[in-house]
């Protein structure tokens, strides 16, 4: 489906386009880099802050950017060798990329407060690097979050700027954060989010399977009227075909599914809160957070409606910068080119079950909504109470850049989303709520979640399931020889250079 949306452009928009037209995307000459393991320097005293960390720097400061440090970490995936680490170092910056202490353990943390020591250690390490004969000391540090690393980094900056009491302990939270490790956090000078997630709470919320709503703690029986994987409801299983694991759901099915998904999420929250209250009464400890209460939830990992149905979250609401495959940067309504990605593993009880405790569920996995108002459409997600979880990107970006003392400029924020994935509207939501007056949103055409080219997107666009991967990837290469990832790294480099 294509649609034409025409909206008037403001004077600010025209000024932005004029500025972008003057920027050279041919970019700077890529530099040779060094790559040094610095894990021990981030793990000091008795504090284990990260599992591993690597420092990358250009061998010289010919580009004049090595004083800008970028710290990259993800909440549960290894990022010491993330593609952007060397890419930004090649463009003249200093990058420090780490694996968090929860790498490979995505169901083990009760909140991003447990990741804050790692980010603090990364920022402090970068700031401690002395000048050498060929390279300067680090004078500015920007934190970088990709995917689920994005809400983690926004949480950190929100707490660093405003304190835990304001950032994550308010009455709106289902469960307040634990502030033990949240004092004296050094502020970053800016934030970059790359194909950002709306948060752990939203991730789990949209994965909870309403087909299990007869019994929220049992895998069977499944309610067929709420089953997104049933062929009768529009799901397609055609292994090897371009429409495999796709779906075209009816308006009525989507409404029924989403209502029951919201209800099951609310039921899970209420059960967890009841268990916590019983525990506090039994122990006489009003501060018990439920770490000793098992909470095993089948059907809570994989039933996300928009993944197979690509008509959902297909567009942005407003025009934004597109890092286009022809090398231009038009301002337009952004359209996703992502392939369908229904996840049949959600039907398997073992694969779809999260084995956690009450603290983990309420602290990092739960999110409130309004059943009946919670919807997913072509260009929106509505009816979700992002403020109810400290793991949400939305309340955290609302707190970044306010600087209550009024003595600092706003904190710059850059968001780049990828059109070969499904975070177009989610990243626009983050951008719309962001407080910072220096905020930029761009979209990388044809990029998958990790930033590289989407071969399957090309096969679908050209209706050629046999198209070789190299040929399909080349579809997204611009006249200057840059693919989607290079266009993103170049844009980041320009953004950083313009501010620091």
Image (tube, rainbow, N blue to C red):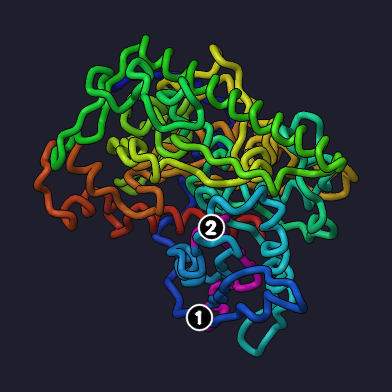
Q: Is residue 414 magenta?
A: no
- Magenta part, dominant SS: loop
Q: Residue furthest bottom?
A: 133
Question: In the image shown, does 236 or 460 lie closer to the viewer?
Answer: 236
**Label 2 vs label 1: CA separation?**
26 Å
Q: Is residue 427 visible?
A: no
Question: In the image shown, does 225 or 78 lie closer to the viewer?
Answer: 225
Residue drawn at point x = 50 percent, y = 48 percent: 147
Residue drawn at point x = 50 percent, y = 27 percent: 216
Measured as percent of width and height from the top left, residue 75 is found at 57, 55
Q: Quadrant of the N terminus?
A: top left
- Label of residue 35 in the image: 1
Measured as percent of width and height from the top left, residue 457 is found at 25, 42
Indicate the secondary structure of the residue bearing disc 1.
strand
The residue range painted magenta reads 58-77
Q: Would residue 35 be found to the left or right of residue 177 on screen?
A: left
Query: Which residue is identified by label 2?
Result: 105
Q: Quadrant of the C terminus?
A: bottom right
């Amino acid at each position: 489906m294509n649609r034409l949306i025409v909206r008037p452009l403001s004077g600010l928009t025209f000024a932005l386009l004029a500025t972008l037209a003057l920027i050279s995307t041919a970019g700077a000459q890529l530099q040779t880099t060094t790559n040094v393991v610095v894990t021990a320097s981030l793990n000091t005293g008795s504090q284990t802050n990260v599992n591993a960390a690597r420092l990358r720097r250009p061998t010289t400061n010919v580009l004049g950017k090595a004083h800008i440090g970028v710290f990259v970490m993800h909440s549960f995936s290894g990022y010491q060798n993330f593609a952007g680490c060397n890419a930004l170092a090649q463009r003249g910056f200093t990058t420090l990329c780490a694996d968090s202490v929860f790498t490979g353990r995505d169901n083990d943390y009760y909140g991003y407060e447990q990741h804050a020591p790692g980010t603090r250690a990364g920022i402090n390490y970068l700031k401690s690097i002395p000048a050498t004969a060929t390279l300067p000391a680090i004078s500015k540090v920007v934190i970088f979050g990709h995917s689920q690393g994005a809400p983690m980094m926004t949480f950190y900056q929100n707490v660093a700027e405003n304190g835990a009491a304001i950032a994550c302990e308010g009455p709106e939270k289902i469960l307040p954060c634990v502030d033990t490790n949240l004092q004296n956090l050094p502020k970053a000078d800016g934030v970059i989010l790359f194909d950002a997630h709306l948060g752990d709470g939203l991730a789990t919320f949209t994965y909870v399977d309403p087909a299990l709503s007869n019994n929220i703690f049992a895998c069977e029986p499944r309610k067929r009227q709420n089953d997104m994987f049933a062929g009768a409801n529009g799901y397609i299983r055609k292994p090897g075909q371009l429409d495999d694991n796709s779906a075209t759901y009816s308006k009525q099915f989507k409404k029924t599914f989403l209502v029951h998904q919201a209800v099951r999420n609310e039921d899970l929250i209420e059960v967890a809160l009841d268990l916590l209250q019983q525990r506090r009464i039994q122990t006489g400890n009003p501060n018990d957070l439920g770490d000793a209460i098992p909470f095993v939830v089948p059907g809570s990992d994989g039933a996300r409606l928009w993944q197979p149905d690509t008509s959902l979250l297909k567009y942005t609401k407003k025009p934004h910068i597109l890092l286009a495959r022809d090398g231009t940067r038009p301002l337009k309504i952004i359209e996703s080119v992502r392939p369908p990605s229904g996840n049949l593993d959600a039907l398997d009880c073992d694969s779809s079950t999260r084995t956690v405790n009450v603290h983990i569920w309420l602290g990092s996995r739960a999110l409130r909504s309004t059943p009946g108002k919670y919807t997913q459409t072509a260009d929106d997600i509505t009816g979700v109470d992002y403020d109810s979880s400290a793991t949400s990107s939305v309340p955290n970006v609302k707190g970044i850049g306010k600087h209550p003392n009024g003595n600092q400029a706003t904190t710059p924020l850059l968001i780049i989303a990828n059109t070969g994935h499904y975070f177009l509207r989610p990243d626009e939501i983050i951008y719309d709520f962001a407080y910072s007056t220096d905020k930029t949103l761009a979209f990388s055409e044809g990029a998958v979640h990790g930033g590289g080219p989407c071969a399957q997107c090309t096969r679908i666009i050209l209706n050629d399931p046999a198209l070789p991967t190299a040929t399909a990837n080349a579809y997204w290469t611009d006249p200057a020889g840059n693919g989607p990832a290079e266009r993103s790294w170049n844009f980041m480099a320009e953004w950083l250079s313009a501010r620091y």
